Amino acid sequence: MIQVLPEPDALLLPPIFRRGWYVREVARQNGWVQVCYEERVYHGNQPGEVVLSLTGWVVETAVTAILIRHLYHFHPTGFLPDEWFADPGDHGYSSWRLFWQPLATAKLVQGQQAWLEMVRDRLAIGDLSV
């Protein structure tokens, strides 16, 4: 649950954060963490423009620094469009414009680019061993 103040009896905000969302830590106080979620619109490889910013307080035990990513490597056998849109429906999420990028020059959002740099060569030759 997210609250307007770092106090157990503070006003609750509507449920805006879900498990697995990336948030930026703003402050810590007495077992509480103030977090900020930013939703961005990306135009190609340009830095994303913030279109939504939500800030609130959560109990410290609800925040983790551990992030687990999954990589899927596939070989398509049919037509793939240059770009497409993902619409998650009525679950309160935005639509996303998705597109392919050449692996050799791909740029990802902040926080993911360092990961791509670490594995780019292995991805190019299909070596996905740990």
Image (cartoon, grey):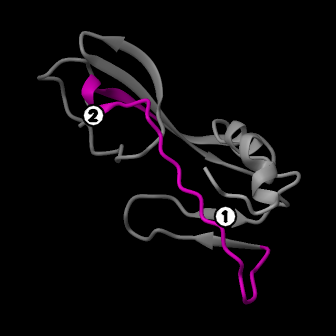
Q: Which numbered dot is residue 112? A: none
Q: Residue furthest front?
A: 129
* Category of crowding for the residue at label 2, using alpha-carbon neighbours closer than 10 angstroms: few (below 14), some (14–19), many (at least 20): many
Q: Which residue shows up at 35% across the image and 28% down it? A: 56
Q: Residue furthest right?
A: 105
Q: CA distance from mark 2 to mark 1?
A: 29 Å
Helix, strand or loop under label 2? loop
Q: Which residue shows up at 34% across the image and 21% down it? A: 33
Which label's residue is closer to the chain start, 2 or 1?
A: 2
Q: Quadrant of residue 91?
A: bottom left
Main SS, magenta residues: loop
Image location (x, y in percent) of residue 106: 82, 52
In the rendered structure, does residue 80 fall within the stretch colored magenta?
Answer: yes
* Category of crowding for the residue at label 1, using alpha-carbon neighbours closer than 10 angstroms: few (below 14), some (14–19), many (at least 20): some
Count all numbered tags in the image, as a single digit: 2
Q: Which residue shows up at 67% across the image and 37% down it? A: 110
Specify the quadrant that holds the N terminus.
Answer: top left
Image location (x, y in percent) of residue 40: 61, 45
In the rendered structure, does residue 81 fall within the stretch colored magenta?
Answer: yes
Q: Which residue is mark 2?
A: 2
Please give left or right for residue 112 compared with residue 24 in the image.
right
Q: Residue furthest top?
A: 30
Q: In this picture, is 68 found above or below 102?
A: above
Q: Amino acid at mark 2?
A: Ile
Helix, strand or loop under label 1? strand
Image location (x, y in percent) of residue 90: 38, 68
Q: Amino acid at mark 1?
A: Arg
Q: Which residue is mark 1?
A: 97
Tell me the magenta residue range. Answer: 54-82
